[in-house]
Image (tube, grey):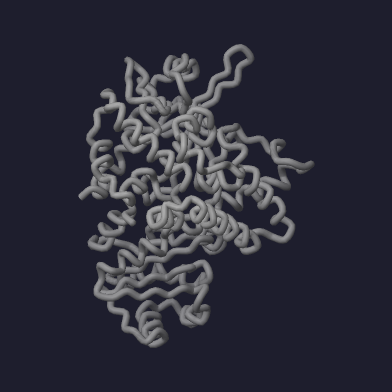
Amino acid sequence: MERLVFEELKRWKDSSQRKPILLRGARQVGKTYIVRELGKLFSDFVEINFELIPDASKIFDRDLISERIIRDLSLFIGKKIEPGKTLLFFDEIQESPKAIQSLRYFYELMPQLHIISAGSLLNFELEKIGMPVGRVTSVYMYPMSFLEFLCAKNETLLIEMMLEHDAKTKLTEVVHRKMLHLLGEYFAIGGMPEAVQCWLDTENLNKCSTIHRTIIDSFRQDFNKYATKFQIKYVELFFNTIPALLGQKFKYSNIPGEYRKRELMPSLDLLIKAGVAHKIVHSSGTGIPLGATANDEKFKLLFLDIALALTILGSDSASWLLDPELNLVNKGAITEAFVGQELLAYSAFDWKAQLYYWHREAKSSSAEIDYLVQKNNQIIPIEVKSGAPGKLKSMKIFLDNHKYSTYGIRFSSLNFASDNRIQNIPLYAVAEVVDSQRALMQSLIN
């Protein structure tokens, strides 16, 4: 399956300025698959999984001299590793801290060697030993985007249409409805690659649902790898509760039970480090960058994947296939989460993306904007709405009071439309507002 990040990795392969890569992201978002696909472009590919072959870690215990490590690894696996010809892949590298430390020396002493490392719980080990700053490139992966889902279904003409479409022009109604039904498929299947592949192979929703449950169970099995015995119950509590809190300003009092913030907060941080949850942080939106006026104490939460969230909630996924338009109108929280998931998927790969929202608390006139996006020198407010356009009071309040915002975007199930200050863009076209990955998106149809 085509992934946007693949083009980024191909550019890295051919760059003379490349550094070893740390491929980062939650479990089962496709890290190992994409590296193996890249390996097909090399004369040779060597994969060492430190979880499956723990003895490989011992090679790094003696010293971190690159030439010796490569020699001993070659002898250990019975296959020559040749700089410039071999792609060396260290999988589950968090199991070998010394291997992580060795990456900086590979960059300094053997820059011609292509090395990619990955690990679903890598962030926890990096927190202990530190990041080799300036010597390693981080690349972030998320679940498959809707655009990648369309590519997997060979709907390349629709992708081309979306990338070339003028956001002020309505689509023909029959095309618009086709896109909504494909979006309904995506809500039911989600962006976890194994579930998408199952859908492509079988179109059997029950089999896909089984995969969703298996993935959820694998996340739960990870809890004891990064949480203490005392923390596991809190991590489990957050894991089960976050899908029900999508779209809401988070309060620790929303977590069921008589718990204190200081008990709960570390466990939430663990899920965020594991990539299972993401924070949407409040920003006043009064200046650039958005983070300069952010308040980390005010936030909403996003779950890794909308289909996994729906599975945890016990939602009927079949309804998204049978009547996607009705579901998009009635289930505002999950559609808002979808937009957040899309914004992350289309963010720059070499940067840990941060999402922002805006909220004004006032007795007579409270207002909220679901997302704030920085685009060049503009701050674009984004609202995710259902059904009829409505008055968009919050959007108008924000635009009237923020000098860096001249227009806003409303995502909904409605067709394209525009007035002087607010563009209505269908939910399936989030990719249209993200310019930073336009060239990579184009690669999906070439």
Q: Residue 98: image x %, image y %?
A: 49, 72
Measured as percent of width and height from the top left, residue 256 is found at 73, 41
**In the image: residue 185, left or right of residue 18:** right
- Up the image or down, 376 lies above or below 212; here it is above
Percent x, y of residue 204? 46, 53
Query: Which residue: 55% across, 25% down?
Result: 359
Q: Residue at x 43, y 57 (%)?
A: 198
Rendered view: 340 above or below 221 = above
Classify residue 181 by image quadrant.
Answer: top left
Quadrant containing the N terminus in the rendered view: bottom left
Q: Residue at x 33, y 53 (%)?
A: 3
Res. 6 visible in picture: yes
Residue 181 to residue 167: above or below: below
Residue with the most extreme top position: 364
Total labels: the figure holds: 0
* Nearer to the camera, 290 or 210: 210
Q: Position of residue 113 (x, y in %)?
A: 30, 71
35 to the left or right of 256: left
Query: Which residue is at 24% across, 42% downward?
Result: 157
Q: Is residue 414 above or below residue 289?
A: above
**Residue 340 appears in the picture as rendered:** no
Q: Quadrant of residue 411?
A: top left
Going by the picture, which residue comes out furthest to the left?
446
Q: Give whichever of 224, 33 is nearer the camera.
A: 33
36 and 263: which is toward the camera? 36
Q: Quadrant of residue 324?
A: top left
Q: Is residue 213 left or right of residue 204?
A: right
